Amino acid sequence: MRLSVIGCGYLGAVHAAAMASIGHDVIGIDVDAAKVAALSAGRAPFFEPGLTEILESGIQSGRLTFSTDFADVAGAKVHFIGVGTPQVPGGYAADLTYVDKAVDALLPHLSSDDIVAGKSTVPVGTAARLAERISGSGATLVWNPEFLREGWAVKDTIDPDRLVVGVPSGDAGAIASDVLREVYHPAVTQGTPFVITDYATAELVKVSANAFLATKISFINAMAEIAEVTGADVTMLADAIGYDDRIGRKFLGAGIGFGGGCLPKDIRAFSARAEELGRGESVAFLRQVDEINLRRRERAVRLVLDALGGSAHGKKVTVLGAAFKPHSDDVRDSPALDVAVRLHGLGAAVTVTDPEAISNARALHPQLTYVRDRDEALEGADAVVVVTEWDEYRRQLDPAHAAGLVSRRIIIDGRNCLDPGAWRAAGFEYFGMGRP
Ligand code: UDX
C-alpha cells in the first residue's frame, strides 16, 4: 500500500521506515529540508537502535522516500500524522499548532477515499475537531496512537503490544478499520490485539497509559522517600511487591525519576485538558506525581552535598549519564542533566559523560564540561553520580578500576543500578535512592 507520513521527527521517521520495512511504499514529508536530506541519504537524525538499518534498506529498495513537498503525498491511501505536540511555552497544555498546520497542508491533496490517521499524542477531543476540518474532502479521519518507547522504537512499531484505532461510526469507520488492519498486517496476523474504538477512547488510551506509567514510577519514588526515613530498602520492597502479578515489577525502578519528551509533558497536558473539561479533580493526583518526580532530582543533589560535607563548591563532581534513559541520545527534560545543572549551580566543577547524548547535552547546557571518555571523566573526581543506567556504568564499570581514578571514593547511585556491596568492597561510600 502507498502511505504518507507527515512529520519526520522521532515518531514519524521511525514510523515511515518501519512501514517500508514491512513492504509498504512510503513517502515521508517534513518542512525541515535538512532533515529530509539526511533521511534521504539514510542518516537517522537521532540515535535509535535499528533505525539506520531499516532506513537504508527502505531507501535502497525504492520503497522509502522523503520530501518537503506535500504534493508528493499523491497516490497515498493512508496519511499518517506524526508531528510533535510539545508543551505550550509558559503553560501545561499541549501545543497543537503543528498538528493543525500538517492537516491544513494535507487538505488540498486529499481524495475522498483517503484515510488520515493521527498518531501524535493529543488532548482528548482533537480528533473530532480535525474530522470536522477535513470533512469537505470526503476523506476519513482515524486516531491511531503510538506507544513506542525510545530505544525500542523500531520493535515497538513493527511488533507492538497492541494497536488502537479510533474511528467514526458507520460505514466509513468500518472501511477505515479494515484498511488499518491491512496496513499493520504482519502484527495483526501474529495476533496482536487490535482495538477498534471511538475517537475519544483512542486519544485517552494513549494519555492514560502514560499517566499510569508515570504514576507507577512516582509511587515507588514516594516509597523511596518513606524508606529514607525508616531505613527500609526500596529496591527490595519493589521486588517483593512486584511478585504480585497484579502489580508487576516493571516501572518500579526508584531513582531520580522520569523525564524525556513524553511522560512529563503528557501528564501536564492531561491535567490541563481535564481542567478544561471541568474534571480537574479527577486527575489532581497527577500534580503530585509530577511533584514527587521533581523532588527526587533534589534528593540526588542533596546526597551529593551531604557526602561532600555540606558543600560542592569547587569540588569535581563526575556525572555519569546525560540522556533521560539508556539507549537514547535524547536529553529533553532529562533528570540526569537536570541533576548536573543543579550541581553546577551550587558551584561544583561538573564533568558529564554519556555514550550517546553529549552533543545534544552540550547544545542545551554549554556551561557544563563534557568528556567522551568515561575514565577521563572519572579522573580526580571528588564524587561520582550515576544518573543514566547505561551498561557502560551499570555493568562494565569495575569499582576497583574506578577507585584507582577518583580522588575521593564517593558514589551516588541515582538509578539504584549498582551493587552497593561491590562498591563498598572497593572502598567507596555508596549512597542509593531509598536504600540504606
Ligand atoms: C514513554 C512510554 O513508555 C511509551 O509507551 C510512550 O509511547 C512514550 O513515553 P519513553 O519516554 O521512551 O516512553 O521512555 P520510558 O521507557 O517510558 O521511560 C520514561 C522515563 O521513566 C525515563 O526517564 C526512565 O528513566 C524513567 N523510569 C522508567 C524510571 O524512573 N523508573 C522506571 O522504573 C522506569
Image (tube, rainbow, N blue to C red):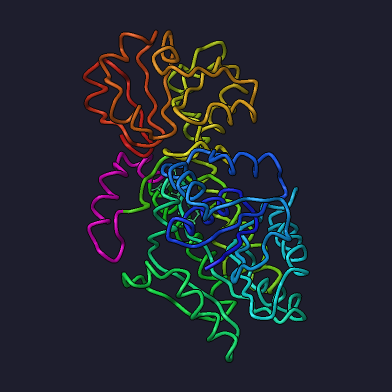
Dominant secondary structure (helix, strand or loop) of the stretch shown in magenta: helix
Q: Residue at x 71, y 45 (%)?
A: 32
| Quadrant hosting residue 367 | top right
Q: Residue at x 50, y 59 (%)?
A: 210
In the image, residue 174 lies at what x, y percent?
Answer: 53, 86
Q: Which residues are magenta?
A: 224-249
Question: Residue 108: within the magenta?
Answer: no
Is 197 displayed left or right of 417 in the figure? right
Q: Nearer the viewer, residue 428 or 183?
A: 183
Is 210 displayed left or right of 7 in the figure? left
Q: Residue at x 60, y 84 (%)?
A: 168
User: Is residue 289 among what the camera can see?
Assistant: no
Q: Is residue 419 above or below residue 94?
A: above
User: Is residue 320 among what the camera can see?
Assistant: yes
* Tally of marks: 0
Question: Residue 231: within the magenta?
Answer: yes
| Quadrant hosting residue 303 | top left
